[in-house]
Image (cartoon, rainbow, N blue to C red):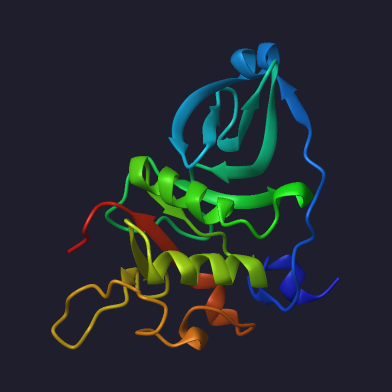
Amino acid sequence: MKLEDLLEMPYLNDEELSYQVLAKISTKALNKGFEEFSKTKDLTIYSNKETSGFIAGYLRAGHLSTVIKIASRQSAYPIEPAQVEDYHQVSMVSVSKEYALTGNAKAVYEQIAKKVPLVSDHEQYIGAQGLWKSLARSSDVFIYVFNSEVQDYIRDQADKIVKYNSKNIEDDKIWGTDPTHRMVLLVATIKELE
């Protein structure tokens, strides 16, 4: 085992996370384990009643055809970002093969972040990097970059927190394989931070 495995050193995995076949969930099971959280496009988003996380999909006769499943935690790793409460930190995302590359993941992330702050995982794949950059370029939520080493968000020369737009902060300050990247988290929220 490598030292970086023990430290759970986050890094940008230079590969795509594979798409999966996600199960259909019966309306009965859906009502038992989940509660409706929000809607976007034609998708309905549900939060898990028992654990932290979300599923989103298309409601069909008698079932939910699952498009995306987001496992999350409500205690951030490696450190809690400042100025946000009741957030969800993404820990694993599964996207259905059937609905891959349709923009659904972005729509779901954005809708969740409109209701509760969404924090990135400390390890990401290429798809997650693209998703966060897309949110930063064009969405109704703000994206901020929190550096846990200094326990603050990246700020400009006037000491104002930078609203990340996918180009105004260099990629290597957010993603990479250097141990310092384990301390960087992205935060999506409707709230303007100061």
Residue extending furthest toward the right? 1
Q: Is residue 24 visible?
A: yes
Q: Nearer the viewer, residue 165 or 6?
A: 165
Instruction: Identify the residue at horizontal 66%, vertical 51% (top origin).
Output: 92
Q: Nearer the viewer, residue 4 or 42?
A: 42
Residue 16 falls in image quadrant: bottom right
Instruction: Identify the residue at horizontal 47%, vertical 68% (top origin).
Output: 134
> Would you say 22 lies left or right of 190 here?
right
Q: Is residue 98 above or below residue 136?
A: above
Q: Nearer the viewer, residue 24 or 121?
A: 24
Give the quarter of the figure containing the N terminus: bottom right
Q: Position of residue 36 (x, y in %)?
A: 49, 24
Q: Is residue 44 above or below residue 156?
A: above
Give the quarter of the figure containing the C terminus: bottom left
Instruction: Identify the residue at horizontal 66%, vertical 15% (top origin).
Output: 27
Instruction: Identify the residue at horizontal 51%, vertical 56% (top origin).
Output: 106
> Would you say 191 lies left or right of 62 here?
left
Q: Position of residue 157 (x, y in %)?
A: 18, 88
Q: Is residue 125 visible?
A: no
Residue extending furthest toward the left? 158
